[in-house]
Amino acid sequence: MSTFSLTASVIALTAVAATTASARDNVSVAGSSTVLPYATIVAEAFAAETDFATPVVEGGGSSTGLRRFCEGLGEGTIDIANASRAIKDSEVETCAANGVTDIIEVRIGYDGIVFASDIAGPEFVFEPVHWYIALANEHFVDGALAANTLSNWTEVAAIAQSLGIEGDLPDQPINAFVPGTNHGTREVFDENVILAGCEQGGFFDAMLAAGVDEDTAEEKCMALRTDGASVDIEGDYTQTLANLDSTPTGIGVFGLAFYENNTDRLQVATMGGITPDVDTIASGEYPVSRPLYFYIKAAHIGVIPGLKEYAEFFMSDDIAGEDGPLAEYGLVADPELEATQDMIDAEETL
């Protein structure tokens, strides 16, 4: 999609004014659970260091936030959607159908998806194929799909070894807690771990060789078990952590920042031989990382007090830079931060 410089149009401002008797005095934000702690830090600092009211920041997941964002313009709708994935073309179309035609995309920085378990438990050394073998609803074996009935990580390791992928896994039940489908993290997990594991193990190519079309093969690869071995977590990472507390043999999927703020309770697994940390994510060595975003309704700028100022404050060097509080919490600063700052200043839209 092309980018162009936006000057707040009379038409857009009129559309907002027509739906609001008097504008809210605070910015309204909702969306990604991964971005939530960063946005909360920024909102509190923004209120403390400016004359604007404290922004209201809610979670709910990337898809939920973008759905609310696309409901339309006006005081009764949110101004910003936080997301741990890029907005989809279908969501842009829904936004446009509801009058949200001018959207500013802001890349905050980068985060990793990590696999963590109880600090007192055994260590895990993963490849993507391990997660596919453990959690796929079906495996393509001998030319046909067969239900996944595996119950222990040792069984997973044995199958991986038969495929030429070395490494042992603990003698521990398969109890995985993964983000629900309302979370952007889930989409990254499905594609960068489950689908990647299906490909790594040769299952994807086997389906194609058997005449299965590519879309169906991808769908079958990413369909997860529903027998209790894989549990969707619809809430935020604190809910995943609570599940690990009640199931010490479990392993959960988290954002790097959440893990780094709970290292007294969790240990992290390697993936592809790489330990996730700020350095390996910044360098691209760690294979499961992703950019984080927030999206702004350009038509609300100048109508909702402090909206543009909040975005500028969020992405300032002092906040989003390498030495800022977001980096201290675990965010990997965007090397193109200055370009993002210029884009916000110019109000460039998708």
Image (spheres, rainbow, N blue to C red):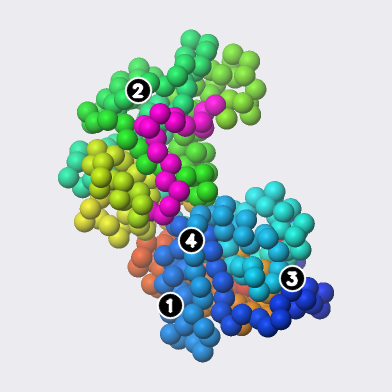
Is 56 on the left-hand or right-hand side of 264? Answer: right
Q: Please say whether residue 172 is visible from this viewpoint.
A: yes
Q: Nearer the viewer, residue 169 or 75?
A: 75
Is disc 1 surrounded by few (<14), some (14 to 19) or many (20+) residues within 10 Å? some
The residue pinned by badge 3 equals 5
Task: Give the class, few, some or many, for how many residues have Cα within 10 Å of label 2's Cα (few <14, many ≥20).
Answer: some
Would you say the residues marked 1 and 2 are in contact, meaning their CB atoms lie under 8 Å apart?
no
- Mark 3–mark 4 distance (CA, rounded to whole Å): 30 Å
Of helix, strand and loop, which one carries label 2? loop
> At which x and y percent is residue 86?
59, 53
- Find the residue positioned furthest to the bottom: 51
Q: Residue at x 47, y 16 (%)?
A: 146
Kindly identify the amino acid type of the residue bearing the numbered disc 2: Leu
- Give the extent of the magenta segment: 220-237
Give the distance between the C-alpha atoms of the residues marked 2 and 3, in whole angstroms.
54 Å
Residue 328 x %, y %: 35, 68
Give amino acid for label 3.
Ser
Q: Is residue 10 left or right of residue 204?
A: right
Q: Residue furthest right?
A: 11
Residue of label 1:
44
Q: Residues within 10 Å of mark 3 (few under 14, many from 20)?
A: few
Q: Which residue is mark 4?
A: 59
Return the x and y of residue 87 as percentages of the image width and height: 62, 54
- Asked if the residue at tag 3 contacts the one at tag 2, i.e. Cβ–Cβ closer than 8 Å, the answer is no
Which-is-in-front pick, marks 1 and 3? 1
